[in-house]
Image (cartoon, helix red, strand yellow):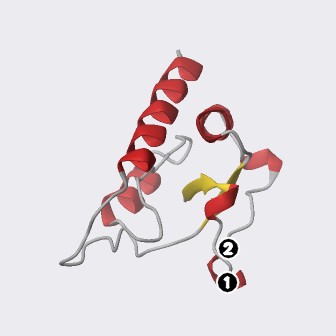
Amino acid sequence: MTTCCAEDQPSSPALRHRRPPRSQVGRAYQAAHEALAQAWGVPAVDMGAGGSIPFVTAYAERFPAAEILVTGVEDPETHAHGPDESLHLAVLERATLAEAFLLGGLS
């Protein structure tokens, strides 16, 4: 799951990912949404993107009751893993703020 702010939501419906059923939403997921909304000033949305990360699947199989929260810092111009990869500092600042809010919300 990649979580982003509403203003960065992709225009393509194929890239959008629906929120998990309420019965599958745990404390970390809720805290992440609250932290992202607080940092960006708009409600957070879920977005499926990118490829798979093999160790996440292995963790999920080994610890089926655990909440696994994968976060990343990207904007549309990041070009992740490409030769021209970059990041707007304002996005990094908000993402860092969101991580701090998340850690505070989980403490």
User: Residue 16 shows which numbered tag?
Assistant: 2
> Do the residues bearing badges 1 and 2 touch, measured as CB atoms within 8 Å?
yes
- Separation of marks 1 and 2 at Cα, in angstroms: 7 Å
User: Residue 97 shows which numbered tag?
Assistant: none
Lateral position of residue 49 relative to residue 26, left or right: left
Q: Quadrant of the N terminus?
A: bottom right
| Residue 55 at x, y percent in the picture | 31, 59
Give the quadrant of residue 77: bottom left
Residue under the image location 37 percent in, 55 percent down = 88
Q: Secondary structure at mark 2?
A: loop
Lateral position of residue 98 relative to residue 81, left or right: right
- Farthest residue to the top: give it: 107
Residue under the image location 48 percent in, 40 percent down = 94
Q: Give the residue type that dot 1 points to.
A: Ser
| Residue 86 at x, y percent in the picture | 28, 64
Of residues 85 and 21, the one drawn nearer to the viewer in this rendering: 85
> What residue would you read off at disc 1?
12
Counting other residues with Cα less than 10 Å from the Cα at mark 1, is it few (<14), some (14-19), or many (20 or more)? Answer: few
Q: Give the residue type that dot 2 points to.
A: Arg
Give the quadrant of residue 87: bottom left
Q: Secondary structure at mark 1?
A: loop
Residue under the image location 63 percent in, 74 percent down = 10
